[in-house]
Amino acid sequence: MSRMLDDASLGWRSGPSLPGWQGLSRALQHHGQCLGLRALDGLAEGAALQLAHPDLHPVHMRFVAPPGLPLESTSEFIQQAACGLMSVHGRASGRPQALGVDYLAALNAALAWQASLAAAVGQLRGGQFTQVSLDPLRGGLLSIGQYLAGATAPEDAERLLPGQDDALARPPFVSLEGTAFELETLDSQPWRHFWHALGLPDSLAGKAWQHFLLRYAKAVAPMPAECLDALARLPLAQIRQQARASGVALVVLRSPAQRQADADYPASLHTPWRLTPGPQAPLRPAPRPAALPLQGLRVLESCRRIQGPLAGHLLALLGAEVIRLEPPGGDPLRHMPPCADGCSVRFDALNHLKTVREVDIKSAAGRAEIHALCADADVFLHNWAPGKAAELGLDAADLQLARPGLVHAYAGGWGDAPVSAPGTDFTVQAWSGVAERIARASGTRGGTLFTALDVLGGVISAQGICAALLDRSLHGRGNQVHSSLLGAADLLLATPCNSTPPSLLQGVFETGDGLLALDCQTRQQWQALGQLLGGTCTPAELPRRLASADARHWQTRCQQAGIAASQVHQDLACLANDPRLADCFGQRAYRSVQSPWSFT
Amino acid sequence: MSVSVIVPTLLRPLTDGQKQVQAQGGTVRHIIEHLDSRYPGIKARLVKDDQVHRFVNIYVNDDDIRFADGLATPIRPGDQLTVLPAVAGG
């Protein structure tokens, strides 16, 4: 199997693990293997990872944290609590709770690697960039950026709280046999046809559609009981037949083991990216990047929704100039409420660092314009439907005629998996086993309505692009790099989940005022908690013991005692006012999230 | 018959910044045509080839007109029409 980064001189070593967050170290290790980097002997001193090459000063990547959330007493569980992820997941899972997968470990490992790779690119272009720091809390906040924007919009802000909807009255749906499955269509008419054929009134299908349509944006999707009951009376085969006749995709929830038996799984597990070297292309002279490593590089982005735009946003945060190619009239997502200054805040959260150029890719003139733009670009990123780039004459080979050194990137859905359904967050969660794993941990029937894979897929796409840029810098050639939501899902489940050994006490508990997440992983922490609360206590007793003070008080006291703890803000608007996070937000009309990295 | 129409941010430049306007007509199509006569350009933002634009949803009270009679959906006194831009998929 070919290596992602085909350069035997590139090596790396990891630093010491964070005591309570072993999953982060495992994820860093796994990403290093997937990137094809040679593991060097010894531990990196004072850094979480060190990247080395004969042409580089070693790049040192460190994790940093705000004073209110020290790294030495943090964990996956506490990070998911502190950044609001539990609350977003809780909107449709009954209560604020963790995803049950090491999501922020995978996400932050990808962010750590992409910044390190970008720093190496910056050095090879004449910059310094030997020190990189990453705040994993900001990484977590970035993952919920669009929900945070919606909750803090100046007008019509969304107040969606955990547990407000029935956790069983939402997709996935369940057949007579008890099989859970996702339905997917991006158009209303197949949806209407499907329910009509099952004998439900159109008005009811319309009400269901309203929520189904917005589940990507709001992380809730309450379905009318009549819809759920109608499906629960039918065998899966009959539902499948009707879905096919209506043009609605149906994907059954599979287990991780089923996914691991797929023919395309081993390759996807080995690397979530497919890097294909292109033509030789001497590097062009360019200004030396000063503050950020990708300064002076130009990215053309033709992407909709979350995955691709998030990848472009991350490249912009690393200093690249990102030009969004939008259809004539602009991206329709710009108008999706809530809005500020005439623009959707959730759209703005992912796109405010970019400039926009309206291009009609369906016209010959538009395609010629893209070819012309590529002559001065370094990266072309798209997330069109499979085969569309070739059909439009905008594939890697086409655009590398205009710019041989171009990195042509595709942020897709299914990778090489033989699935015909639309590759969206929820269908891929179902197919990959991620939904089943999250359902088991959350006590629900399906995965999370937080767009976990769109976000991770966007981060993975940007990581692959940084690796491709490094390959280009080292070997003087263009290339193409493919990534997918399914690759992100496989990466997420690749490392064993949960803490090792399991926590002695982990949960979200009521206090006198507000919720507190606690994660005692060691006997020492368990004993310290007992001392703090006046005696060893069971989870059932904790709310009574914590009733004498509010969550912020207990968070401080626990941290002073070395116990991993965090307040859980159920309303994301409160998260935005948490003093621990004060430095994490930008000055826009809503709470935007600052870059998780800094470079020196 | 006069009904109120909730105007999204997208269209407020055409309605002098108003978030809610009044319009007359017996169907959604008539309402939109009446709106267009008062606020020129609004119809082109909502309708194309006699269909509601793909990324625009129109509700009569809480009911999506795509699940009723589309632009021919009847309007009764006291109804409220809401225009909501939305895009499916993540």
Image (cartoon, rainbow, N blue to C red):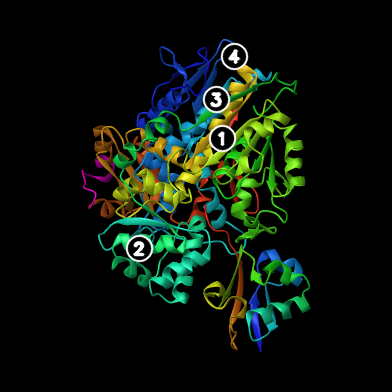
Distance (Cα) linking label 4 and label 1:
22 Å
As shown in the figure, which amino acid type bears the numbered disc 4? Leu
- Report if the CB atoms under discs 4 and 1 are less than 8 Å apart: no
**Structural distance between the alpha carbons of marks 4 and 3:** 12 Å
Badge nearest the viewer, 2 or 1: 2
In the image, A197 versus A118, the foreground residue is A197
Along the line of sight, the residue nearer the viewer: A501 or A255: A255
Q: Earlier in the sequence, mark 4 or mark 1?
A: 4
Residue B18 percent across, percent down from the top left: 71, 72
* Precedes in sequence: disc 2 or disc 1: 2
Q: Position of residue A61 (x, y in %)?
A: 51, 24
Cα–Cα gap, marks 2 and 1? 38 Å
Q: Is residue A317 left or right of residue A192?
A: right
Which residue, given by chain and number where applicable, does mark 3 sit on? A116
* Mark found first going from the N terminus, 1 or 3: 3
Q: Crowdedness of circle 3 by 10 Å Cα count: few (<14), some, many (20+)?
A: many
Going from the N terminus, do you reach mark 4 or mark 2 first?
4
Q: Where residue A239 is drawn, which disc sits there? A: 2
Pointer 3 and pointer 2 on the same chain: yes
Q: Most extreme residue toward the top, as rendered?
A: A54
Disc marking residue A56? 4
Q: Please report the residue visible at 35 percent of the width from the left and 71 percent of the height from the top.
A: A225
Q: Mark 3, mark 2: which one is toward the viewer? A: 2
